Image (cartoon, rainbow, N blue to C red):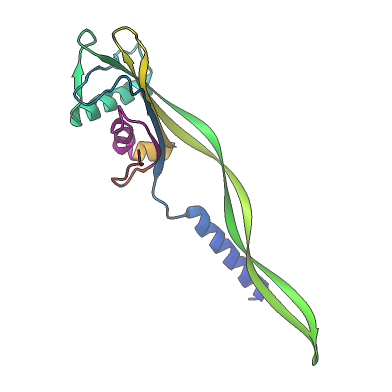
């Protein structure tokens, strides 16, 4: 096998490793709270009618079930719309997004020069950053709270988004990561396969 063939194989292996990566599945999260209207887990919150076939498609009905299940498990005070201080709404959708990144590819070049003893040929090894682009299918969950009394304003809005395959595989952590920040202002990245939360 020639040196060139060995070098091409090495380059292919390095590039494949860089693309495969060993990163943990993560999601981008952002939430904004109006400080004039604090909300906590003891606040009386009403959920939308996510079970009605006329109210939502399948993805939204399933999302509604997960939201309700997680909010109960986390100790939120869920009530009927007539008793509520705040009305929770949500939406979930998939979209394709273009992502750019760079891959370090090994390089090899030949250097020719002269010394007192005569001509010299050598090989220089290095790395070159090669830009790459890929289309990723993302899932985005939005949650927001509106006051039920006047003024009926939105007092909290948060969203989380991750690659669709990660959002499906880690469905409970995906929903829970955002619900943990109801009533808070936060922005960052959350790891879906570990108990990691962004800083407030």
Q: Nearer the viewer, residue 159 or 59?
A: 159
Residue at 22 percent of width and 7 percent of height: 82
The residue lying toward the viewer, choosing from 191 and 188, is 188
Residue 62 is drawn in which quadrant? Answer: top left
- Of 67 and 15, which appears nearest the observer? 67
Q: Residue at x 53, y 33 (%)?
A: 96
As drawn, which residue projects farthest toward the bottom? 117
Quadrant hosting residue 31: top left
Q: Quadrant of the N terminus?
A: bottom right
Asked if residue 69 is among those painted magenta in the image, a careful observer would answer no
Q: Is residue 15 above or below residue 50?
A: below
Q: Quadrant of the C terminus?
A: top left
Q: Quadrant of residue 81?
A: top left
127, 147: nearer the viewer: 147
What percent of the width, then of the height, locates residue 190? 37, 42
Q: Tell me the residue at 54%/62% (across/down).
A: 14
- Residue 77 lies, with reference to residue 189, above or below; the image says above
Q: Position of residue 147 (x, y in %)?
A: 31, 13
Measured as percent of width and height from the top left, residue 49 is found at 29, 14
Q: How many marks?
A: 0
Give the side of residue 54 with respect to residue 120, left or right: left
Q: What residue is rendered at 41% in x and 33% in y? A: 30
The magenta segment is: 170-189
Answer with left or right where residue 39 lies relative to residue 14: left
Residue 196 % position (x, y)? 31, 45
**Where 156 sits versus 174, above or below?**
above
- 58 horizontally vs 1: left or right: left
Decide whether residue 175 is among the magenta residues.
yes
Residue projecting furthest to the front: 36
């Amino acid at each position: 096998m020639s040196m060139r063939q060995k070098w091409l194989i090495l380059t292919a292996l390095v590039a494949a490793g860089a693309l495969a990566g060993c990163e943990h599945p993560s999601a981008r999260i952002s939430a904004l709270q109006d400080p004039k209207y604090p909300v906590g887990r003891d606040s009386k919150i009403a959920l939308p009618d996510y079970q009605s076939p006329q109210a939502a498609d399948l993805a939204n009905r399933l999302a509604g079930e997960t939201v309700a299940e997680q909010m109960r498990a986390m100790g939120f005070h869920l009530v009927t719309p007539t008793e509520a201080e705040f009305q929770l709404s949500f939406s979930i959708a998939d979209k394709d997004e273009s992502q750019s990144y760079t891959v370090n590819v090994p390089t090899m070049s030949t250097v020719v020069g002269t010394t007192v003893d005569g001509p010299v040929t050598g090989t220089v090894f290095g790395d070159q950053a090669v830009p790459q682009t890929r289309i990723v299918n993302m899932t985005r969950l939005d949650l927001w709270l509106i006051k039920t009394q006047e003024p009926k304003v939105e007092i909290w809005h948060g969203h989380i988004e991750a690659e669709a395959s990660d959002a499906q595989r880690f469905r409970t952590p995906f929903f829970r990561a955002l619900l943990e920040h109801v009533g808070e202002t936060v922005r960052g990245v959350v790891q879906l396969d570990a108990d990691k939360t962004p800083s407030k």
